[in-house]
């Protein structure tokens, strides 16, 4: 069972100090051996819809830019407006 409670970051609470030590060790790459981890950590995590949308939009922008850079119209349009497409267009 896991319980999470908020405590002040500057408290001298013993458990808080222990958590701080563990977090620092994890940030330094020191972690538990994989055989000691709970079974639930070996299954894929559920997808976040917002992260999937963000990734899909990012991939679409990259593909569009690659296609635009290869387009014969790009050189012609750059003579008129080298800031194409506008940021508002890419935000869609």
Image (cartoon, rainbow, N blue to C red):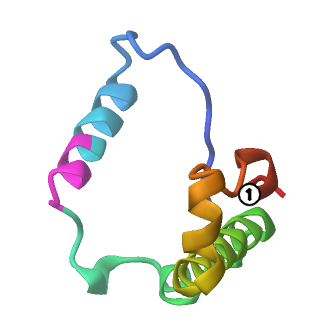
Q: Which residue is mark 1?
A: 90
Which residue is located at x 57 percent, y 57 percent?
79
- Based on the picture, tell me whether residue 22 belongs to the magenta stretch: no
Residue 84 lies, with reference to residue 8, above or below; the image says below
Q: Which residue lies most toward the right here?
A: 92
Q: Secondary structure at mark 1?
A: helix
Q: For this view, does 4 lie left or right of residue 85? A: left
Q: Which quarter of the figure has residue 1?
A: bottom right
Q: Which quarter of the figure has residue 31?
A: bottom left
Residue 63, position as x, y percentages in the image: 61, 83
Q: Which quarter of the figure has residue 55?
A: bottom right
Residue 68, position as x, y percentages in the image: 61, 78
Residue 13 lies, with reference to residue 17, above or below; the image says above
**1 or 25: nearer the viewer:** 25
Mark 1 closeness class: few <14, some 14–19, many ≥20 residues within 10 Å: few
Q: Which residues are magenta?
A: 24-30
* Image quadrant containing the C terminus: bottom right
**75 or 50: nearer the viewer:** 75
Which residue is located at x 72 percent, y 70 percent?
57
**68 or 80: nearer the viewer:** 80
Residue 33, position as x, y percentages in the image: 21, 77
Residue 18 lies, with reference to residue 14, above or below; the image says below
Which residue is located at x 17 percent, y 60 percent?
29
- Based on the picture, tell me whether residue 27 belongs to the magenta stretch: yes
State the count of labels. Answer: 1
Q: For this view, does 27 lie left or right of residue 71? A: left
Residue 36, position as x, y percentages in the image: 30, 79
């Amino acid at each position: 069972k896991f319980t999470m409670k908020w405590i002040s970051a500057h408290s001298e609470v013993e458990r808080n100090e222990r958590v701080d030590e563990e977090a620092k060790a994890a940030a330094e790459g020191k972690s538990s051996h994989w055989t000691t981890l709970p079974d639930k950590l070996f299954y894929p995590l559920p997808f976040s819809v917002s992260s999937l949308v963000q990734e899909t939009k990012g991939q679409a922008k990259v593909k569009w830019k690659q296609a635009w850079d290869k387009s014969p119209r790009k050189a012609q349009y750059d003579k008129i407006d080298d800031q194409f497409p506008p940021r508002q267009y890419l935000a869609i």
